[in-house]
Image: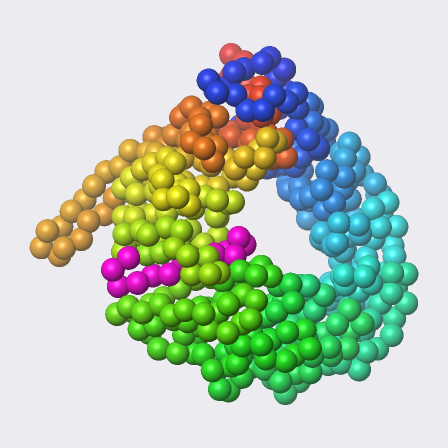
Amino acid sequence: MKRRFAAICLAVLLCAAPFAARADLNCTSAIDMDTGSVLLAGDGTVLTDEYAQLLPLIPGERFAGYTEDGACYLLNETGQRVTDRAFETLLSDNGRTILFTVGQKTGVLDGGGNEIIPASYTQIVPCPDGCYLALTGDPYDAGADGVYHLDASGEESPTGARVLYGLGYFESGLMAACAPDGRMGYLGADGEWAIRPQFEYAGDFYGSYAEASVESGSGMIDKSGNWRILPKYTVFQKSPTESGVMIGQTEVTSAVLFDPETFGESSRIESGEVYFSAYYDNGLAAVYLSDSTQLIDARGTVLLDLPVDANVDTWRMMGQRAIVQSGEWGDASFRLYDFSGRVVTGPWQEIQALGQGTDGKALFACIRWDVTEEVDIDLGWRMLEEVPDTREIAILDEDGAERMPAARLDEVEKLDGGLLLRVNGRVRVVDESGKTLFQEETEEDEA
């Protein structure tokens, strides 16, 4: 079906409690639809003809536009091609430059589409200092490849380091990498081994410390490669913050917390079984015990004491709020908690963290739908299925205030300064005042 796209400028109030007043989106945005993608200006004006796919490269400034025949072009914030040169792919680099591939080799462009580094490498990774590390061999074969250092102008120099399985990415100035003998160590921005390969596992550095493992077990190292927590634990996890939770385990019935300043064992958690996840950006950990689920901080303080079947969403915690599921999928089993133990909202059948609004408050999509239930008493199972076209989504902030009442929607995505709403395969974009900026329409809508 032929579709056209219209920017609708009438102010349509979507919610009784509006978002912080805004007139538009904060920057040019790539909008994906079933039929392709377009670029929208902040006021909802369509800037491009339809591309098969549009991807942001330098936020709000440069985009990769893929055509139906597979060619890729570099676009600016007005939707114009920066250069007529076609590429195989364009990838985000360091927010200043862009990786491109031609003939399955990779090079580097500046924002103006000028070639800084020719497409002569099988892999290029940006360094924190504006330079690059690169490989010329196949990173996916079984052989080790020599590492090259490229300065900002593309001048190449071999580093002497050789790696298996390609290059990773820098975290806190170091890159975990695998040496030809299978041991792991860390490369510095110069492409040489900053910490010699000696580990069975080398995790990313977050701040000054990283998880690492040797034959005797797992622990934590500093940027000199020295052990700050000895490798004697069968399981060890460090949250991705400088002074967040550090927790280890030698047996399933207990876990040890470490003091974030001295790194000594500070307290012990014991239960019939103890499992944990410390990979929260806010430095917390979820601990799953035989009789409860707890959310704790680096000092072991219990922030939430939850039912035993509760599951804390590891990846979508925002600020002082936690999304918790307690029950089966399809039931109204999701709640949003603050760290005093108060239920901010719920139960819902799903809660998704969207990001921060322009007023700084976290926004959440709270979702409900109708279900059909099938039960087999003899086999002891129960199955719930979502009834099509019954999904409704409300937008609430971190205080539980309604920003958009529940409406028939399939999906909500956070944009910079607004929201993308999908229903029945069609797209609408609103700013944070609730005004519709863009709506995908069909010819049937006009009739």
Give the camera-side residue of 150 and 327: 327
On the image, the x and y values in percent for residue 248 come to: 44, 72
> Residue at horizontal 51%, vertical 67%?
259
| Image quadrant where residue 93 sits | bottom right
Give the camera-side residue of 93 and 176: 176
Give the camera-side residue of 147 and 423: 147
- The range drawn in magenta is 279-292
On the image, the x and y values in percent for residue 260 come to: 54, 65
> Residue at horizontal 52%, vertical 16%?
13
Give the camera-side residue of 259 and 331: 259
> Residue at horizontal 57%, vertical 61%?
243
Q: Is residue 394 above or below residue 88?
A: above
Q: Is residue 21 above or below residue 84?
A: above
Residue 319 colored in magenta in the image: no
Q: Is residue 104 above or below residue 82?
A: below
On the image, the x and y values in percent for residue 321 come to: 45, 43
On the image, the x and y values in percent for residue 252 come to: 33, 74
Magenta-colored segment: predominant secondary structure? loop
| Image quadrant where residue 168 sits | bottom right
